[in-house]
Image (cartoon, rainbow, N blue to C red):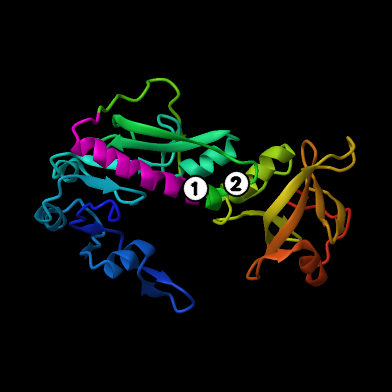
Amino acid sequence: MLAAGHDVALVLTQPDRPSGRGLRAAPGAVKKFALMQGLEVFQPPTLNDAPALARLAAAQPEVLVVAAYGLLLPPSALAIAPRGALNIHASLLPRWRGAAPIQRALLAGDRETGITIMQMDAGLDTGPMLSQHRLAIAAADDAHTLHDKLAALGAEAIVHALAEIAAGNARPVPQPESGVSYAKKISKEEAEIDWARPCKEIERRLRALRPAPGARTQLRGEAVKLWRATCATCAPGSGAPGAVLESGPAGVLIACGDGALRVSELQRAGGTRLAAADFLRGCPIEAGERLGTAR
């Protein structure tokens, strides 16, 4: 938006969060960039109080632009800008309304996703759409790579949308009533691998939860995160789900409900992410062992 010549009157971002070993409050990327550009930054813990709304109104914004803000914008905040509030949403609405559209698209095995520029209303990502921009999901995409692709696409989309608004050409359309789905936040329980599920589904889970929070399983009662893996075939009945079929430098082959997963990158609790060969030197895993909570 700055490169396109827009005047950014005020930058809102969440309060600084504890970071690093000392857990000292540290600014996020949005604040760092804004300060480097000499922009005013405002970090209210909520927008549901009068002082925060007054500060926002004092900036006299013509339009609000929202991207992964993480705080609720009440109707009183949405009404401040005469041209409303635009949300850069990382899905093709009405599919995957909510907090985790990128992860949910990967978990579901969607072949494409995209960016929707929408006008915000009181609902959860229910407002009318100004534009949609499609993006194919590559077989190797994870939440990190897909996030970065969508961020770049969203930056282009919002600049185009603002130009259309300025020219008087914006034509919002209601979202379709069919095809609605919700992308709730990823829970800790969802990070635990169910080895009875098909291999392709488990492999998608690894990618959807990478880089955070990471998919995990249990090895001898200890949590182990699995970061990278590929699906392989195995003979029917060769091992119960979660059974280790092979273990070596090429990876750890684990039986699933359908097929097997060859894990090539692992991490012990409190350790670092390691290639399978390095991991096995410090923590050998033998064929016949069982992963997961079931014993």
- Precedes in sequence: disc 1 or disc 2: 2
Q: Is residue 16 left or right of residue 106?
A: left
What numbered label is drawn on residue 149?
1
Kindly report which numbered mark, 1 or 2, lies closer to the viewer in this rendering.
1
Q: Is residue 124 visible from the viewing direction of this image?
A: no
Residue 155 in magenta?
Answer: yes
Above or below residue 174? Residue 71 is below
Range drawn in magenta: 147-170
Residue 98 in magenta?
Answer: no
Q: Position of residue 144 (x, y in %)?
A: 54, 53
The secondary structure that dominates the magenta segment is: helix
Three-letter amino acid code of the residue under disc 2? Asp
Three-letter amino acid code of the residue under disc 1? Lys
**Which residue is under mark 2?**
141
Q: Position of residue 291 (x, y in %)?
A: 76, 53
| Residue 281, image quadrant | bottom right
Q: Position of residue 51 (x, y in %)?
A: 12, 58
For the residues labelled 1 and 2, say whether their Cβ atoms are less than 8 Å apart.
Answer: yes
Under tag 2, what secondary structure?
loop
Above or below residue 210? Residue 255 is above
- Within-10-Å neighbours for mark 2: few <14, some 14–19, many 20+: some
Under tag 1, what secondary structure?
helix
Distance Cα–Cα, label 1 vs label 2: 10 Å
Q: Nearer the viewer, residue 239 or 76?
A: 76
Q: Is residue 225 left or right of residue 261?
A: left
